[in-house]
Image: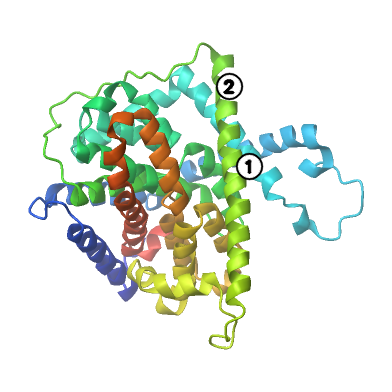
């Protein structure tokens, strides 16, 4: 693999430095910058990305991931066709003149969440997911210095989501320090749930080669990024490194059937929440755009919320490695992700024609978008954390907006790390 380092890679390096500097500026104790954690966290990100994309043998793994996600999508379509017939993708009773119109988000993407949620619960009950989480917990314990419940919470966050990871460590919530609570908030917003990963892949599959590998990598590398930025903003004052990681959990199912049933119910709640949020958010954007349409044209085109967000976030898009010619589009995607949701942002990203955006920019934006750090998640996190830790609700509310900034910048840090590596790593 030829090693070539260009100005765009140095641009991403500058972005890494600026993101760390911004978080240091928000720090509650600027004298406690975690230098070794910064080196370890970014090192873990680089190592994982190289492991997945730079080693020739990793192609087998990526192909396996893509095949597995395709199988899940195909299996889900069988269930949808059984229940909804032609509306779920079955044989059409009439002549189809527009194949694209058959893609209905509610019937093609959201059902995947039900299947993945049920499968995740089953794998947890069978112990498979516990082994995977234990492996990541060991890595986080050794390489970035996490200890105790925080290592388990962060590693489980990658696969089960924000509030669900707290349920796994419920027995230790009263022992978490202020820094650990903040870290769980930030990591939760920087990550996504396993139940939504395949849905993202389905959305991006036609415009992003190796979409499954990139989404999986984005979900994993954002965890150490979230830990790092959280520790910079709210430094830890208690040494947890000597504590043994306890992988016991209060999350239990009575049987395999119970796991599938409860997993399906949880998935239904997630899918319905996503559907409701998307309906409301897309409608509000349309309403705002109608109001903005009354303003004079800007640059020969109507003023829209997407264009305004593009201007606001253009500098950040450039810092993470996106060329200036595409930074406005990238800034728009970043703004939509924060103000609306990552689902809307991914849909917008997938709608950009291949000729209108370079593959490198699309890859960087995938990592920057893959996280729950949006305004809607503030309410979800506050409610979930507050319900599980009612005695610390005022503290959580005092940290939640700062956690949104940390979680959003964590995904941008991951994107900048991706952009800082040679383009040849991704076959560009």
Reply above or below: 324 against 283.
Answer: below
**Of marks 2 and 1, which one's residue comes earlier in the chain?**
1
Percent position of residue 119, x then y:
55, 27
Instruction: Identify which residue, 383 or 122, lies in the foreground.
Output: 383
Q: Residue at x 32, y 73 (%)?
A: 6
Q: In which quarter of the image is the N terminus?
A: bottom left
Instruction: Identify which residue, 387 or 59, lies in the foreground.
Output: 387
Specify few, some or many for label 1: CA neighbours under 10 Å numbering under 14, 14-19, or 20 or more.
Answer: many
Percent position of residue 144, x then y:
20, 41
Reply above or below: 5 against 391.
Answer: below
Percent position of residue 419, x then y:
35, 63
Instruction: Identify which residue, 366 or 214, lies in the foreground.
Output: 366
Q: Residue at x 29, y 39 (%)?
A: 394
| In this rendering, position of residue 99 left or right of residue 11 | right
Instruction: Identify which residue, 188 or 155, lies in the foreground.
Output: 188
Give the quadrant of residue 224: top left
Farthest residue in the top direction?
Answer: 254
Percent position of residue 45, x then y:
30, 49
Name the residue tied to disc 1.
110
Counting every numbered tag in the picture gives 2
Determine if residue 67 is in view.
no
Farthest residue in the right direction?
Answer: 94
Q: Quadrant of the C terminus?
A: bottom left
* Secondary structure category for the residue under label 1: helix
Q: Residue at x 57, y 34 (%)?
A: 269
| In this rendering, position of residue 298 left or right of residue 163 | right
Specify few, some or many for label 2: CA neighbours under 10 Å numbering under 14, 14-19, or 20 or more.
Answer: many
Reply above or below: 285 against 133.
Answer: below
Name the residue tied to disc 2.
260
Determine if residue 397 is in view.
yes
Q: Distance between the residues labelled 2 and 1?
A: 17 Å
């Amino acid at each position: 693999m030829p090693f070539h380092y260009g100005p765009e890679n140095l641009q991403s390096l500058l972005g890494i430095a600026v993101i760390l500097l911004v978080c240091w500026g928000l720090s509650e104790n600027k004298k406690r910058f975690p230098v070794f954690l910064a080196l370890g966290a970014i090192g873990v990100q680089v190592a994982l990305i190289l492991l997945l994309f730079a080693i020739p043998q990793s192609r087998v793994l990526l192909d396996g991931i893509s095949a597995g996600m395709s199988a899940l999508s195909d299996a889900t379509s069988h269930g949808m066709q059984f229940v909804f017939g032609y509306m779920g993708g079955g044989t059409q009773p009439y002549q189809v003149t527009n194949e694209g119109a058959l893609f209905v988000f509610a019937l093609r993407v959201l059902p995947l969440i039900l299947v993945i949620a049920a499968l995740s619960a089953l794998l947890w009950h069978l112990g498979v997911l516990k082994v995977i989480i234990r492996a990541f917990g060991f890595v986080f314990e050794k390489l970035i210095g996490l200890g105790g419940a925080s290592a388990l919470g962060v590693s489980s966050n990658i696969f089960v989501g924000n509030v669900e990871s707290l349920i796994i460590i419920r027995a230790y919530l009263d022992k978490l320090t202020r820094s650990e609570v903040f870290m769980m908030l930030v990591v939760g917003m920087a990550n996504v749930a396993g139940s939504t990963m395949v849905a993202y892949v389905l959305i991006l599959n036609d415009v992003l080669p190796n979409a499954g590998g990139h989404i999986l990598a984005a979900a994993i590398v954002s965890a150490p990024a979230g830990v790092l930025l959280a520790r910079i903003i709210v430094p830890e004052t208690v040494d947890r490194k000597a504590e043994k990681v306890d992988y016991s959990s209060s999350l239990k199912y009575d049987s395999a059937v119970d796991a599938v049933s409860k997993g399906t119910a949880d998935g239904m709640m997630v899918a319905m929440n996503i559907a409701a949020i998307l309906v409301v958010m897309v409608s509000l954007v349309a309403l705002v755009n109608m109001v903005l349409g009354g303003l004079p044209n800007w640059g020969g085109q109507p003023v829209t919320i997407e264009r305004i967000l593009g201007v606001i976030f253009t500098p950040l898009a450039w810092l993470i490695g996106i060329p200036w010619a595409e930074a406005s589009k990238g800034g728009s995607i970043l703004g939509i992700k924060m103000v609306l949701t990552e689902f809307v942002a991914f849909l917008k990203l997938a709608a950009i024609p291949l000729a209108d955006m370079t593959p490198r920019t699309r890859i960087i934006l995938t990592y920057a978008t893959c996280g729950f750090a949006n305004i809607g998640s503030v309410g979800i996190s506050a409610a979930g954390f507050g319900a599980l830790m009612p005695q610390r609700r005022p503290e959580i509310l005092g940290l939640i907006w700062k956690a949104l900034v940390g979680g959003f910048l964590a995904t941008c840090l991951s994107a900048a790390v991706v952009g800082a590596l040679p383009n040849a790593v991704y076959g560009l």
